[in-house]
Image: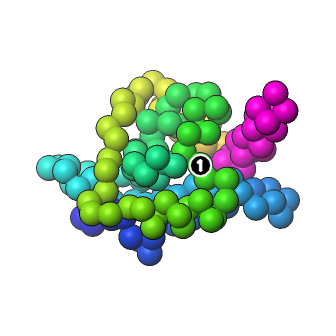
Amino acid sequence: MRTITNNYRDAHLLNLGSGGDRGPYLVTQTGAAPNDSLAKERMFVLRPDGRWVDFNAYACQGKPEAMDEIVFSTTTEVMAMFGKLLGRPQVLDLPIDEAGLKAWLERQKSGDTLQAARGWAVGYEERHRKKRRG
């Protein structure tokens, strides 16, 4: 099992924009956390604060605005963050609500998860426009 790293070459950058829009971006990496004695494979996302977290900790919350914490507005922000990441990855261990996760997984069975993420991204753009306006 591969352990996650802070190397941008090991991460995947997903453009969640729709209709040719650029961003928001989600940075993911699959592997085990550096301190995980069980070496359990998980999909991690990089947060704008430089810490990695299990994606399921956000997916299980069932509210789109929770996902706002784990995206970057631009690729410039992503590359700047990777420039600051040194040493072993810092993994934030957040709780995962099993019932919420099961409900999220059930919703994904009926459609394309990337399309669902893009739908969430449209809402993200709307929420951030409202914040900028006041």
Quarter the C terminus occupies: top right
Q: Specify the farthest residue to the bottom.
A: 9
Q: Is residue 58 left or right of residue 90?
A: right
Which residues make up the magenta segment? 111-134
Residue 60 higher or lower than 74, as above or below: above
At 36% from the left and 51% from the top, the residue drawn is 42
Residue 56 higher or lower than 46, as above or below: above
Quarter the N terminus occupies: bottom left
- Label 1, residues with CA under 10 Å away: few <14, some 14-19, many ≥20: many
Q: Specify the farthest residue to the left.
A: 37
At 44% from the left and 36% from the top, the residue drawn is 57
At 58% from the left and 55% from the top, the residue drawn is 26
Residue 36 higher or lower than 3, as above or below: above
Does the segment drawn in magenta span residue 30? Answer: no
Percent across and percent down for residue 16 are 69, 55
Circle 1: residue type: Val
Q: Is residue 79 left or right of residue 39?
A: right
Q: Is residue 112 visible?
A: no
**Quadrant in the rendering for residue 123:** top right
Percent across and percent down for residue 92 are 34, 41
**Tally of numbered discs:** 1
Does the segment drawn in magenta span residue 130? Answer: yes
**Quadrant in the rendering for residue 18:** bottom right
Percent across and percent down for residue 36 are 20, 49
Q: Is residue 74 left or right of residue 126?
A: left
Percent across and percent down for residue 72 are 61, 53
Residue ID for mark 1: 71
Dominant secondary-structure state across the stretch colored magenta: helix
At 67% from the left and 53% from the top, the residue drawn is 73
Q: Is residue 81 visible?
A: yes
Q: Secondary structure at mark 1?
A: loop
